[in-house]
Image (spheres, rainbow, N blue to C red):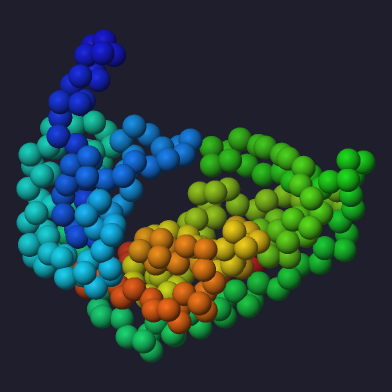
Amino acid sequence: MTEPQQNKDETSKALIKKCTYCQEMKPLTDFQRRTGRRAGPYSRRGPCRSCRGLAPQERAATSAPYGEEANLSAAPVTQHSLGANTAVHSLEASLPMEAQRPRRKPVTDKARERHRQRVRHLLSRLKPADTRALRLNRNGMIRLRGKTDQGRRWHQEIELDLAMTLVRERMAVIVNPYTVRRLYSNKEFRQYVLKRDRYTCFFCGGYGDTIDHLLPRAKGGHTTPVNCVCACNECNQVKAARDVEEFIESGVPQPSPDDFEPSDIPDASEDTLRR
């Protein structure tokens, strides 16, 4: 099949996506495109266009009950399971598994604060490393090296202040006075933070599968184990570039009653904290 014929067949099929707020299956035209170098032709944002302008209370009111949501998600899977492209097929295949997961119990303020204290305790155990051994090279920089998600090695030169921050906050280790090595690839770091926080949002206590910075990068924060926590998609977007205390005082969005329990995975934080 030639490329024009393939594109014609793909556009003729009804591409659908599940909204993260109203939990309804809608065509891709109802979602905003994702931007960036890694965004594919069918990459769309989580909430639909009608839910992006609603307040959290209005989103909860428009969401369908859990039983009806399972029925709605099952119907499009049987209709579009054959002949769809790989991205849509994987999305639809995961819907029945999500519908069978048990729902999370209502999160109380006490449980939410207990989870925050647990995460803060884990972060406090990451003692700042000694950076006095670092020395500038002939270019006045520090060499940073690491690996990509595919295992390919890379290196670049960074400033001394950034190198000291990465070492202090346990994102890198000193190899020699002129070189530091990053401990995690992007994928490994994401899995480490999610498992450490048990897939629980630091702010609302619901199910979380994204990474958020306690000190926003717009205000000088860096992507390190000390500065990153697990967050749900809604809290991550609503918090934006605000500080943690400011965001919590302004009112954290309540987790949806249809949140799923995180999978039973071992707590990998103990082994990783020893690095």
Residue reaching furthest to the right: 138
Q: Position of residue 48 (x, y in %)?
A: 25, 51
Q: Is residue 163 left or right of residue 108?
A: right
Q: Position of residue 152 (x, y in %)?
A: 61, 35
Residue visible at 32% across and 85% down?
Answer: 108
Quarter holding the N terminus is top left
Which quarter of the rendering shows the C terminus?
A: bottom right
Q: Residue furthest bottom?
A: 110
Name, please, the residue furthest toward the top.
Answer: 2
Q: Is residue 40 above or below residue 229?
A: above
Measured along the vertical axis of the image, is residue 101 above or below residue 41?
Answer: below
Q: Residue at x 90, y 53 (%)?
A: 135
The answer to whether 183 appears left or right of 3 in the picture is right
Asked whether 8 or 51 is in front, the reply is: 51
- Residue for point 50% across, 49% down: 187
The number of numbered badges drawn on the structure is 0
Question: In the figure, residue 109 lies in which quadrant?
Answer: bottom left
Whether residue 96 appears in this view of the structure is no
Residue 220 % position (x, y): 65, 61
Note whether 169 is above or below 37 in the view shown. below
Q: Horizontally, is 168 left or right of 201 in the view?
A: right
Q: Is residue 254 visible?
A: yes
What residue do we see at 86% from left, 56% from top?
A: 134
Q: Is residue 224 left or right of residue 4?
A: right
Q: Nearer the viewer, residue 17 or 264?
A: 17
> Percent from the top left, x then y, of residue 175?
80, 51
